[in-house]
Amino acid sequence: MSSAPVLTVEDLSVSFRQRINRQEVISNVVKEVGFDLHAGETLALVGESGSGKSLTALSVLQLLPYPQAFHPSGSIRYQGKELVSASDDTLRQVRGNDISMIFQEPMTALNPLHVIEKQIAESLELHQGIEGQSAREKIIELLNQVGIHDSEKRLGAYPHQLSGGQRQRVMIAMALANNPEVLLADEPTTALDVTVQARILLLLKELQRSNNLGILLITHDLNMVRQVADRVLVMQSGRMVERGTTTQIFTSPKEPYTQTLLAAEPPLRQAPDSSEQVLLSAKNLKVWFPIKRGILKRTVDHVKAVNDASLELKPGHTLGIVGESGSGKTTLALALLRLIQSEGRIEFLGEHHANPDKETLQKMRRQLQMVFQDPFGSLSPRMAITDIVSEGLDAHGLITDPNERDQKVVEILQEVEIDPAIRFRYPHEFSGGQRQRIAIARALILEPKVLFLDEPTSALDKTVQVQVLDLLNRIQRQHQLSYLFISHDLSVVRSIADDLLVMKSGDVVEQGNAAEIFANPQHEYTKALLDAAFNIAA
């Protein structure tokens, strides 16, 4: 580690100004944070959702919404060069070249109108002057490095055509494209399963050694921090509360808040009542996406997202679906919701509708609600929370009286432990954990029988994760809800799932009672997943 830091942050504060009732109101959200980052070092920022970690990282590249955001105090220096209030030319040179960032929510960070190849190529052309075939070869190499299979086939894909984990890996490839000196990694493995996470962490470590890369790691995953960080800085409510070496923080934390973070564990699952009734089932379900080429757009191949999947979900039960990113987990859920076309038999409440009409489909979808992987991307930034939560009531024509509608919103927000007084705010004004609760409220307000939960805790720190799992367990017991729970976090799945389905490359390789599979997995792939998850955790 060099003696001079490559990045220095001193006395950094972040505030936001907004007008409420024609008066300017100032919110102080980050308060006098300071740290040094050396070349070849990994410094982890940890703390609850809303503690100011991401705002601190975004301040380094001056990516906050100025002038609404401003810095009452502070200095940020890269190689001695001041970045606070730096010129646009200076920031353009630094961003994506000297300092790169892996953003927390790739679906909102990637441009939905451009294919993956173009988005990575822009950075290569801007900073290195690499174009044409040379750029294409470099992009394929980067995608292979971060573990995207058939990378050449993925070059023409748009972000919505990739899984959450694949989008995350594209973000990592873009960040590493220009061999930066500093990497700001905001939840870099949030959407990745444990096997891919291990490969990405190994890749980052190799690049760190070869390029003497300084990494500022923002994460809620304390197991990852234990593995890769040299030093840890703990934040709470915008302030630093503790700092030290990784060993010091994990073996002898001094602050009660740090101790609470380290002690947080998912709640134990209470087994539901046994039932012979099947609420939702699928048999021999198949989802293939055609790959079209040429002027006539002929189908030359298929992306085989789901092959011959069968499953059953009982009332009050939770079916966990696990597998690598891109294994078909979310695609399977979307097919069950009839949001994408599929082949095979899908039954809900004992009825099979091969080609349901619009009215039948609408009734089914009211009973089958989805909580998406990326709550910030799935919540409209132009709508207040009250309108987002009540949108389903309007779509199904359930409540027309404005007062009754507002009362229903208040009740459902209280149920997910959100203060109803803030229902007129917008999604960007909430933390990740709060946005996830809002997404759950939007689904619950229609009183469904099944909730599809796609990585509902992946972006949450441990303490908030435990709170959301407690909330889900309580709601399930109160309403006798059934969950189809998709996650790459096997410790979370183990705490909530009654049954388990393991997917690999579109195939169901193992399924059955969750406790039995965790205790005695039969398939080699399941064994590898569990070994990666719990050996890492240990």
Image (cartoon, rainbow, N blue to C red):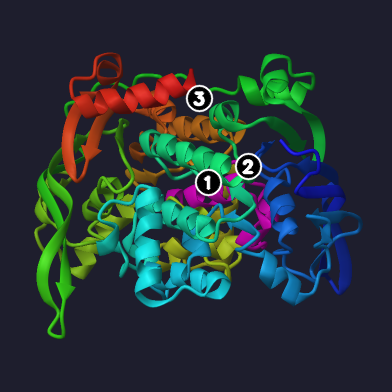
Return the x and y of residue 386 as percentages of the image width and height: 58, 61
Question: Residue 98, located in which quarter of the rendered image?
Answer: bottom right
In the rendered structure, which segment of residues is drawn in magenta?
A: 417-445
Residue beneath the point at 52% across and 46% down: 188
Residue type, numbered disc 3: Pro
Question: Residue 409, located in which quarter of the rendered image?
Answer: bottom right
- SS state under label 2: strand
Q: Nearer the viewer, mark 3 or mark 1?
A: 1
- Chain-order first, disc 3 or disc 1: 1
Structural crowding at the residue carrying mark 3, measured as other residues with C-alpha within 10 Å and reported as few (<14), some (14–19) or many (≥20): some
For the N terminus, the quadrant is top right
Query: Badges 3 and 1: C-beta atoms under 8 Å apart?
Result: no
- Chain-order first, disc 1 or disc 2: 1
Residue type, numbered disc 1: Pro
Q: Which residue is mark 1?
A: 188
Query: Badges 1 and 2: C-beta atoms under 8 Å apart?
Result: yes
Q: Is residue 305 left or right of residue 437?
A: left
Q: Let me know if residue 442 appears in the view.
A: no
Q: Give the Cα separation between the discs numbered 3 and 2.
A: 23 Å
213 in relation to 89, above or below: above
Q: Which residue is mark 3?
A: 266
Return the x and y of residue 469 as percentages of the image width and height: 49, 32
Residue type, numbered disc 2: Leu
Q: Nearer the viewer, mark 3 or mark 2?
A: 2
- Chain-order first, disc 3 or disc 2: 2
Structural crowding at the residue carrying mark 2, measured as other residues with C-alpha within 10 Å and reported as few (<14), some (14–19) or many (≥20): many
Residue beneath the point at 12% across and 47% down: 307
248 in relation to 504, above or below: above
Query: Badges 3 and 2: C-beta atoms under 8 Å apart?
Result: no
